[in-house]
Structure formats: C-alpha cells, structure tokens
Image (cartoon, rainbow, N blue to C red):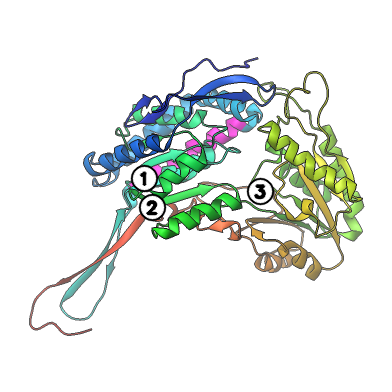
Amino acid sequence: MAARIEETFELFIDGRPTPATRGERRTLLNPATNTPLTEVPAGSADDARHALEAAEKAFRDSGWAIDDGSRRAKALYRLARALEEQLEAFALVETLNMGKTLKESRGDIGYVVRTVEYAAGLADKVQGETIPVPGSRFDYTLREPLGVTVHIAPWNYPLLLAIRSVAPALAAGNAVVLKPATLTPLTALKFAKLAHDAGVPPGILNVVTGSGGEVGEALVTDPRCRSVAFTGSLEVGRRIAELAARRVVPTTLELGGKSPVVVLPDADLERAARGIAFGIFPNAGQMCWAGSRLLVHASVAKELVEKVVAIAKAYRLGPGADPSSEMGPLVSREQADRVLGFVDEARSAGARVAGGTKAAEEALGHGNFVRPAVVEGATPASRVVREEVFGPVLSVLPFETVDEAVRLANDTDYGLFAALWTRDLGSAHTIARQLEAGMVAVNEAPNTFPQTPFGGYKASGLGFEQGLDAVKAYTRRKNVMVQLGGGKPKRA
C-alpha cells in the first residue's frame, strides 16, 4: 500500500512547472500515518504576481477569450476525457494527500470529470440578447469574460471544489489563477499540467501554492484580479470579501454550514438513519454541507438515534488507500485535535456521547483517526450544536411540533443545506419553503450535480456555483444601442 508519492511537484505558471521564487519547499504528511508524503513548493507573493502576469498576457494574446467558444469547448472536452483516463491515479493522490477513502476519491474525481464536461457544453453558448426599444434603434447585449479570475480552494474536496469554479470560468473565456489549500495542493498541480496537454493555452490556467496570508492576499489585492471565488471558513471569507470590496471585485463565497436534518414522526426511519449517517460521517465529516444537527420528533428519537449509533459504530476506520477502509483519517493532527475538543467539551457539560474518541489501535494510533460521534443532551446554545465542527460529529435535538423544528433548524448563523424526512408530500413542500437554506433535500442525503445550483443563505456565503448560471457569473454584460437613422432620434 502506497505511503509516499515519488512525483516531483512545482508551481504551474504560463504552461510549465515553475520552481517557487524563494526556492522554499514544504513537506506534506500522510494523514493516515503522519509520515512524510512528498514536498511541494512554498509560493510567495512574487509567485502570485508572476502567475497573474502570465494569466493577463494569455487572456489578452492567446485568443482563448475572443473566439466563438467552440475552441474552449473542444479543449475542455479533451481535458475531461484525459482526466477520466487518469481517474485512478488522481484518486490515489487525493486519498494519500487528504486522507479520504479511495471510494470517495474516485467519486470526487468522477464528479470533476462531469463538471468539466458540463462547462464544456456551455462554452459556446455564452450569448447575449436583443431588446426591443422605441424608435429606429437596435439594442443588444454582449456577454464578455471578466479577464483574470482568482480561485482559492479548500482542503476537504481538493480538486472537486477547485474545479467547480475554475471550469465555468475557463468556459466563459477567462484566464485563471488557482491557489489550492496549503495542505492539499497535489491534484490541482497535476490537473493544470493535464489541462495544458489537452490544449488549454499557456497562461490560461495557473496554479500557485503557498499560504493564504501571503499568496492569497497578493492574488486578491492585485489590480489584475477581476473576480474571486473562495470556499472555506467564515473568518477567511470575511477577510477576502473585505479585500475584494476595496476594489469592487465580484466575489463568490461558500463559507460552510451547520446544516439541520429534520425527521418527522411519519418518516421511514431505516432510510432516514442511513441518509443521516451518509450526510455526516463520510469524508470523516469534513464537509461544508454536513447534516450535523439532527432534529427529530421526540416520539421517534430513541429508535432513530439507536439506528444511527449502530451505523456509526460499524464504520471500519483505516488508511484511505486500504480498500477495506470505510472512513479515513482527518486531514491533519490539528483538525483531529479540534474535533476532539468539541466532543470533550460537550461531554464535560453533561452531554451523552457515543463514540467520538481518537482511535488508539497500533495500526491507527499514529494517524488522525477519530471515531464517529453522536451527541445527545447538548443544549441548542452549546458550541457543538452552534459551531461548524468539521468532523464526524452529529448533535441530536428532539422537538415536539413542526413549528419548533423549523425554529430550531433556522436558529443558526448558517444556511447552506437542510434535509427533511417525511412521507407527507404536503409537509415536505411546506417545510422546505420555511427552511432558511440555499439547498433542501427531501428524503435524501446531501446530493448535488453540476447542473444544480450550489450555494447558501446568511453566513454560508455569497452567490451560487454550478448550474446554467455558473458561466454567466464569470462574464460581464455590455449593452449596445445603435441608432439606425431614419430621421431625428426621439427620446425614449
């Protein structure tokens, strides 16, 4: 079973691997063992500026932005096919770098393939409209690419959440600079090389690794940056929004959630239990839309919780690269300690916790393995209920009435996702309209597709990704009005 990656990684700027300006490198650890995995360049503000310069030149000179879109579509289709052919290799790198199981990584890379395909299909459909106006005038609109777009990706779905914004930006004709998360940059670097080989011109897709404080801020504050897409924490998202606002740069932010799962007494409890577990325990709970708050009617709470706890206890923990593993480690020691801190605090406050301990077996003890936790008895005001734990931790809150369930569901600063389990179609539609969330699933675990909008309300962010409007978000609309003659123009 692989424990190291022998491949050499550099920044990818202007169509080629590029060493970091300062020559510094950072050792990445395998989260299953906390042993060295590989080294990556530690980029700097100078590297960020180099990438922006290459992107701006490519946007201006390569022709990527000004053709009819068919060239972009063909290149993106070739890229999707190339990634599909290398799916296993990319999945293994993702697993070794981030920790998730191979099954999960294969699903993630497959989703990236579909996302690139979907964007390719939209690349030659970026079009304007004609607008009827009074008099002898012809009025129409144009959709033009923004220029250089900056994308700052998180570590929990390293390639998937990067390409979710990168693909539509490329399809719209922009040049891109991507900064992957410091912990998980490997598949982004590999993807950029694959894109170049598929026919994406040099400078159109650049990847710079490094810290958010230096590289990220250098990218966002540079005048060549015309748009920012960020997925990550609320704290960092606020900082990016502040920096972007100073230059009035459009910003898309996806900042996490504390998602409720509401279970009514008429729900199919077997299906609901499996869906609840699937919404919180895969990827070791490191999901922005994790269904981390279970709101269950008091009459069925005991039965449902017993089913979920049984599922949680049955998870087989192990290195992600082991085909028998059902849950991998958390991404880092720091993240594991953070998650355990939430659980320990809840226990100390009197909550009942099933699981939620660090795995101590010899085969797992050196890694960042945390057993799934189900927390009962924590108050709605407690940190484990209100804050984003970002780990395999489910809090349980019983309710007596639907009104109480809706109030509890909406009692959060976030509004990314919500789920509802019921056999009553009328209740499903009625409650879905009352939930303050950008996405609602009924009788299903968290699910999405490239064609469905992804985004949230309140502190979960600004704007939506995916769907038909994803490409439009990376364009600006220009109105053109032409006086056709035929006498003195009349005022509208």
Earlier in the chain: of badge 1 and badge 3, it is 1
Q: Main secondary structure of the magenta part?
A: helix
**Residue at mark 1 to residue at mark 2: CA–CA distance:** 9 Å
Q: Please provide percent x and percent y for residue 258.
A: 70, 54
Q: Which residue is mark 3?
A: 446
Q: Please provide percent x and percent y for residue 420.
A: 73, 57
Earlier in the chain: of badge 3 and badge 2, it is 3
Q: Given this view, does label 1 or label 2 mark the residue nearer the observer?
A: 2
Q: Is residue 423 left or right of residue 66?
A: right
Q: Which residue is mark 2?
A: 474
Is 45 magenta? The answer is no
Is 117 magenta? The answer is yes
Q: Are marks 1 and 2 in contact (CB under 8 Å)?
A: yes
The disc labelled 2 sits on which kind of residue? Answer: Tyr
**Is residue 167 shown above or below 302?**
above
Could one spot residue 32 in this view of the protein? yes
Part of the protein shown in magenta? 105-123
